[in-house]
Every structure is written in structure tokens, then in C-alpha cells.
Amino acid sequence: MRNEPPGILRERLPLPARHQEPVLDVVVPVHNEEADLERSLRRLHAHLRETFPYPFRITVADNASTDRTPLIAARLAAELPEAGWLHLAEKGRGRALRAAWSHSTAPVLAYLDVDLSTDLAALLPLVAPLISGHSDIAIGTRLARGSRVVRGPKREVVSRCYNAILRSTLDVRFSDAQCGFKAVRRDVAERLLPMVEDGEWFFDTELLVIAERAGLRIHEVPVDWVDDPDSRVHILSTALADLRGIARIGRALAAGRLPLAALRRSAAETGPPGGLPAQLLRFAAVGVVSTAGYLLLYAALRPAAGPQAANALALLVCAVANTAANCRLTFGVRGRAGAARHHVRGLVAFLIGLALTSGALAALHHAAPGAGHRVETGALVAANLAATLLRFLLLRSWVFPGRHAPRTETGSR
């Protein structure tokens, strides 16, 4: 891994259309899979050759196999130009993924289970948002609309119960933690992997929980999935280990032991595309809606509260909504990190706007005490335009600083 300053995640940019080195590294973790490895690897290789538009690599990550799996992996790596393999002396899917992802140079890293239970047609939709720069992590989900799953009732119940426990205890929003079909941008993996302790089946869940808490963007892809009847995963021991992992990471989050601040800053530094012109257009669109809401609130509050109080209340409500909208839409800040600071500084910008509009009202009433409602509204609109321009400058330079670099984002969720 490259040693870069913590908390500075390189900007999400789409990969160039022509790329000489592998763009995608698909890792296949294996342990004693001599019966399935060759058939599955050749099928995966043929699929990527036919459908994937970029150079790719397949890495077999053997973790402590005691059968002929290492020999088969070495032979396939010598035979297939896009294939490679590595061997770990210690067993564990998480250890295999950590080792393979840590040594890969591809900008997008993925993994899938050797049984190929997940339909490979979902592979390109899985990695496309990472290649385009839209998302940080992508996961296959068997629990979303559009997924088609064939498996026994025991595994169905265990899977749904596990994800329900995750939602109720750790308040996660992703739907399927353990589907063996995931991808991550390498720059994101470089910062996530040192935070993940588990080396076995809980590895996926821990990585996703940390990523979500840091405000990273997780893309979900519904998949077609057929259970492997020969699966050797021991459900009870795996479930108990996962429950222990949930308790451990829950304690770490509650105690604040996870260094999420750097990742949160990284997520906050990747905003929507475009420089000043694009930001101005988005700010103007938000401003039009805010101004309309402000005028409606002012008109509704004025008869009971008077002009100054109605102006202050309407401006306060719209300023909070405006800051939240500009935070996400204009300056592309995602996640909850820094939200309190943004709203405090946004409130200062609101007070400046209040001073401008209230000053305009006071000046109008002093100069023309009998001014009608239309004149009053016109003066407020003019003052609001000036306050809006000043607000944009404050938001750009002070509330959301460092949000000016362009970024391309073409994926969708």
C-alpha cells in the first residue's frame, strides 16, 4: 500500500477509456477447492474475456489448502495470461482477501466465491459505479427487489435473521452483509483494511460497517443467486463468530475507538462534478426554491408576527433547509461528519442575510413609512438577492471550503 496522508482520499474520478494495466482484480478466495477451482476459474475467465471492456486480472487466494488446490491454482496461473495466485499459510477468507487486495495494483478490487453461486451477469453492474467514480464500495444483495435466490429454508432464515440483527444493533442500511460478491476502489481499501480486525467470515461485515459509519458510498446490486449444495460453511460456528464480531465492533463504535475521522474527511472531500459554473447553477436552483419558500412563509407569518419577526422566522427556517440542500447538492458533502459545524457557520451566513434584509426593511420604512406590501416585498427580494450572493461566497469559501475541484460521477444507485 502507498503511504499517503491520512484523511486525504484521492478524488473519485472515472478511469480513462483506454487503460493498459488491469483495471479490475477479481480475487477468488479458496480453501481445499480442488473439485471446483478449475471449472469455476475457466468460466469466470471466459466471462470476463467476453464481457468486460477493460483489462482485468483474476487472483486465486489460497488460504492454507491441504489438497491439490495450490497445484491447480499454479497451473492455471501459468496457463491463463490474466490469472495469478498466492498462498497463505493460515486459513481465513478475510485474511486471503486482505493479502490479495493489499498487493494488487488494480484501481478496482473485487471478490467472489469459488462456487460462483452469484450469476456472473451482475459483475459488470457491480464494478461499473466504482470505475465511473460514483461509489466507493459495491455489494451484491440477495435481499433486494429484483434478486432471485434459490436456497434452502435454513440458510434463508439464518441470512435474514443475521441482517436483521445488524440493522437493529448497529443501525446499518446496507441489506446483505455476507453475499460473497463485493468490490471496492483500491484507494478506499487502502484506508479501510487497517481498520478491519477480522480475518474470517465477519471480515465483510466489519468492512461495510466501518465504511458506512465513515460516510462512504455503498452501491447495492440485486443478484441472482443459487445456493451451492456442497457448501462446507458451518452455519452454527460461523453465526456465533459473527455475533461475537457484532458485539466487538459495537463496543468499539460506542467507545469511539475506531479512527473514522480520516475516512469521514475523505468522504466529504469528494463532491458532485463541476467547478464554479456548475456550483453556481446548482446553488441558483436551490436558491430559487428557498426564495419561493421564504416569500410564502413571510406572507403567512406577517399578519400575526409583523414584518421584522416574520422576516426573521421565515429566513431562519429557509436558511437551515438551504444549508442542508447546498451541503449535499451544491458542494457534494455526504455523511454526517462536520454537520454541526456546517450549520453553525451557515447560521452566521443567515445572520448576515438577516442583517441585510432587516436593514433593507428598516431603511424602506424610514424613507417611506407608508410603503405598500408590494414595495415592501420588492425591497425584500432585492435584499435577498444580495444576501444570496454573499451567502454563496461564504458557503464556498468558509462553510464548505476545499470543494472546488471537479469530479465526474456517472453511476446511479
Image (spheres, rainbow, N blue to C red):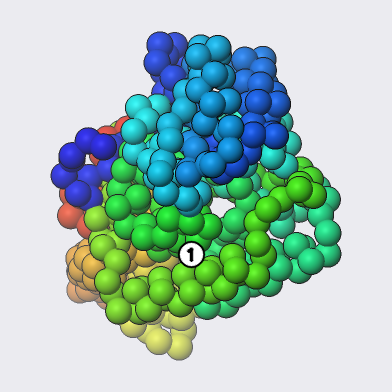
Asked if residue 219 is positioned above or below residue 15 in the image, the reply reads: below
Residue placed at 35% from the left, 51% from the top?
A: 192
State the residue position of label 1. Answer: 293
Total marks shown come to 1
Taking the spot 75% from the left edge, 62% from the top edge, the residue there is 155
Give the answer, above or below, for where 398 lies relative to 20.
below
Q: Nearer the viewer, residue 8 or 319?
A: 8
The local secondary structure at tag 1 comes to helix
The structure residue drawn at horizontal position 24% and vertical position 55%, both measured from the top left corner, is: 262
Q: Is residue 296 visible?
A: no
- Residue 11 in the image: state x and y as whole percent: 31, 36
Please give left or right for residue 263 compared with residue 211 in the image.
left
Residue 101 figure quarter: top left
Residue 98 pos. (x, y %): 39, 45
Task: Locate residue 383 relative to residue 20 in the image: left or right.
Answer: left
Please state if 202 lies on the left or on the right of 360 as rendered: right
Judging depth in this view, the residue of 199 and 293 nearest the camera is 199
